[in-house]
C-alpha cells in the first residue's frame, strides 16, 4: 500500500490536541487555540489537495471532509459557548480513528459524479450534508459526555476524564442546541438532495439505502426535539436517540460509500 507523505503529515496534525489531555489542568488558552487551529489547517490542506482537480468522491476523501467539517463546527462551538471545548477528550481520538481509516483506504478508487447534474446543486448538497454530519457528531459526543458524568455522579467517583468533560447540564444544553441546528441544516440537505435527484433522474424521491436512512435520521431528530420540549426527555434516553440518529447517518454517508467503494468492488 502506497502512503502519501502529505496525507500522513495532515494526519499528524490531529495528534497535538490529544496531548493537551495530559496537562495538569486542561484549559482553553492560547496553546489550546493554536493546536486545534493547527489540526484544522492540516486537515483542510489535504482536503484541498484531494479536491483541487475536481470533486474527489472516494471513501478517503469523504472521511477527510468529515474530519474537517467536525473540526470547523467544534471551533465554532468553542467560540460561542463557555464549556463546549471540553468535548476535546472524545472528539480528537475519534478524528484520529477516522484519519487512520482514511489513510488505509486511500487507494480505493472513487465513483464519478453524474456530469449532467449542475455542480452548484451538488456542491450545496455536499456542504449541507457535511455540516449535518459534523453537527450530529458533536451532538453524539455531548450525549456521551452527559452519560459519563451522570454515571460518575451516581457512583460518587470523579476521574481525570470527568474533570475534563463538560458538566451534565452543559452537555445536555449543547446536545439540544446541536440537534436544533442539525434539524435546520438537515431540512436544507433534504431539499438540495431532492433537487439533485430530480435533475439527475426526473423523480423527487428514490427508494435507496441512503435516502431512506437520511429520512429516518430526520424523523429521529424531530421526534427527539419534540419529546424534549414537550415531555422533558433528557439524560440517557435523549443520548440513545442521538446515538441512533448518528448511527443511521453514519450508515447513510460513509457507510454506504464503504459498501459501494470497498465491499462491492
Image: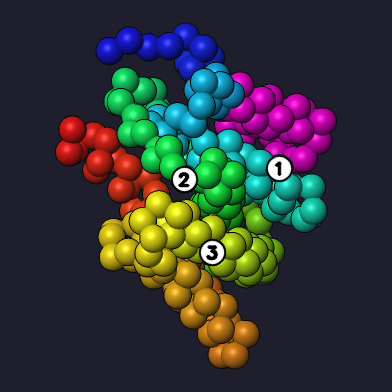
Which residues, given as a range, are shown in magenta? 17-46
Rendered location of residue 22, percent (x, y): 61, 31
Look at the numbered discs 1 and 2 and tell me whether their residues touch, using CB distance below 8 Å: no
Rendered location of residue 160, percent (x, y): 58, 45
Q: Earlier in the sequence, mark 3 or mark 2?
A: 2
Q: Nearer the viewer, residue 155 or 85?
A: 85
Residue at (45, 75) in percent of width and height: 219
In front: label 1 or label 2: 2
According to the picture, the residue beneath numbered tag 1 turns out to be 75
Is any atom of residue 207 visible in this view?
A: yes
Give the CA separation, mark 3 to mark 2: 15 Å
Does 23 sit left or right of 106 as displayed? right
Q: Which of marks 1 and 2 is nearer the N terminus?
A: 1
Vertical arrangement, residue 31 with respect to residue 214, above or below: above
Vertical arrangement, residue 128 with respect to residue 67, above or below: below
Q: Is residue 12 part of the magenta span, yes or no?
A: no
According to the picture, the residue beneath numbered tag 3 turns out to be 191
Residue at (76, 33) in percent of width and height: 33
Does 150 sit left or right of 213 as displayed? right
According to the picture, the residue beneath numbered tag 2 turns out to be 117
Q: Quadrant of residue 110?
A: top left
Residue at (59, 62) in percent of width and height: 188
In front: label 3 or label 1: 3
Amino acid at each position: 500500500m502506497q502512503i502519501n507523505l502529505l496525507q500522513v503529515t495532515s494526519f499528524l496534525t490531529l495528534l497535538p490536541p490529544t496531548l493537551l489531555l495530559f496537562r495538569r489542568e486542561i484549559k482553553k488558552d492560547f496553546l489550546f487555540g493554536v493546536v486545534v487551529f493547527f489540526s484544522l489547517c492540516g486537515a483542510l490542506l489535504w482536503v484541498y489537495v484531494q479536491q483541487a482537480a475536481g470533486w474527489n468522491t472516494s471513501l478517503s476523501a469523504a472521511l477527510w471532509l468529515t474530519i474537517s467539517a467536525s473540526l470547523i463546527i467544534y471551533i465554532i462551538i468553542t467560540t460561542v459557548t463557555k464549556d463546549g471545548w471540553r468535548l476535546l477528550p472524545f472528539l480528537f481520538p475519534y478524528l484520529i480513528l477516522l484519519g487512520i481509516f482514511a489513510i488505509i483506504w486511500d487507494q480505493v478508487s472513487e465513483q464519478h459524479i453524474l456530469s449532467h447534474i449542475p455542480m452548484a446543486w451538488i456542491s450545496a448538497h455536499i456542504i449541507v450534508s457535511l455540516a449535518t454530519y459534523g453537527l450530529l457528531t458533536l451532538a453524539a459526543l455531548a450525549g456521551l459526555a452527559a452519560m459519563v458524568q451522570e454515571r460518575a455522579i451516581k457512583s460518587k467517583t470523579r476521574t481525570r476524564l470527568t474533570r475534563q468533560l463538560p458538566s451534565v447540564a452543559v452537555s445536555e444544553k449543547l446536545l439540544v442546541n446541536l440537534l436544533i441546528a442539525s434539524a435546520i441544516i438537515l431540512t436544507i440537505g433534504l431539499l438540495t438532495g431532492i433537487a439533485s435527484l430530480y435533475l439527475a433522474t426526473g423523480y423527487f424521491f428514490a427508494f435507496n439505502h441512503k435516502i431512506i436512512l437520511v429520512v429516518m435520521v430526520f424523523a429521529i431528530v424531530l421526534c427527539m426535539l419534540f419529546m424534549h420540549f414537550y415531555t422533558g426527555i433528557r439524560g440517557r434516553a435523549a443520548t440513545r436517540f442521538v446515538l441512533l440518529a448518528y448511527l443511521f447517518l453514519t450508515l447513510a454517508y460513509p457507510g454506504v460509500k464503504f459498501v459501494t467503494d470497498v465491499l462491492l468492488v
